[in-house]
Image: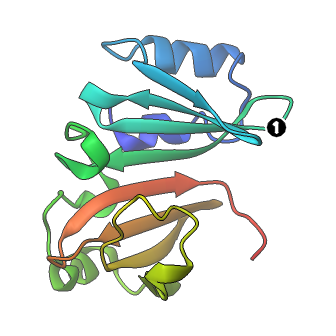
Amino acid sequence: MNYDTLLNILGLPLDDSLTKSILGALPETPEEAIAFEDRIHISYWQLGICIFIEGPEKVVTAIFLFAAGREGFAQFSGALPFGLEFGVSIADGLKKAGTPVRIRTLPVDPEASILKEVPFEKRTIHTYRIADINCHLTFGKENTLVDVALELPYDE
């Protein structure tokens, strides 16, 4: 399954027929669902996919696609936005994806993290727009692409 198929479920409730159809077509069932106060993370560890569900309507608000080993996930094997591949350098990513609408380097202050037990590595996030969707490309400490986040727009 490619990223553009998964884009179709952003903004839809988890119990929507299209959401059920697309997630049901994945070759495995989710291995873990973690509930937080305001959202649920549904992880497909062997597929390199994590889906965020939020609100009382249980709407799909974000989809993360991971490179091998990133946060313990296997590598997402489908096509990525802009024809990118995991492991591509920032320079090559810019050549394929163009100029991002925003660039952030994190962590700004690792000591201010609320997740003290999680080791934070320096990473650079390039944000693009695909139609009305935010597409965040994360380049890790080796300056290579390590994950892609597709999410509904939000107020900053």
> Which quarter of the figure is the C terminus placed in?
bottom right
Q: Residues within 10 Å of mark 1 (few under 14, many from 20)?
A: few
Q: Is residue 42 above or below residue 151?
A: above
Q: Is residue 128 above or below residue 98?
A: above
Name the residue located 49 percent from the left edge and 81 percent from the top edge. Answer: 111
User: In this view of the protein, which residue sits in the foreground, 95 or 34?
Assistant: 34
* Left or right: 17 as drawn, with respect to 43: right
Q: Is residue 83 above or below residue 44?
A: below
Q: How many marks?
A: 1
Name the residue located 49 percent from the left edge and 20 percent from the top edge. Answer: 22
* Left or right: 148 as drawn, with respect to 60: left
Q: How is the image coloured?
A: rainbow
* Residue 59, image x, y percentages: 73, 34
Q: Which residue is mark 1?
A: 55
* Residue 139, image x, y percentages: 28, 73
Outermost residue, right direction?
56
> Which quarter of the figure is the N terminus placed in?
top left
SS of the residue at dot 1? loop
Name the residue located 36 percent from the left edge and 46 percent from the top edge. Answer: 65
Residue 54 seen in the figure: yes
> What's the amino acid at mark 1?
Gly
Corner quadrant of residue 52: top right
* Residue 112, image x, y percentages: 56, 80
User: In this view of the protein, which residue sits in the foreground, 67 or 120?
Assistant: 120
Name the residue located 35 percent from the left edge and 82 percent from the top edge. Answer: 98
Q: Is residue 34 above or below residue 99?
A: above
Residue 131 seen in the figure: no
Corner quadrant of residue 36: top right
* Residue 45, image x, y percentages: 31, 29
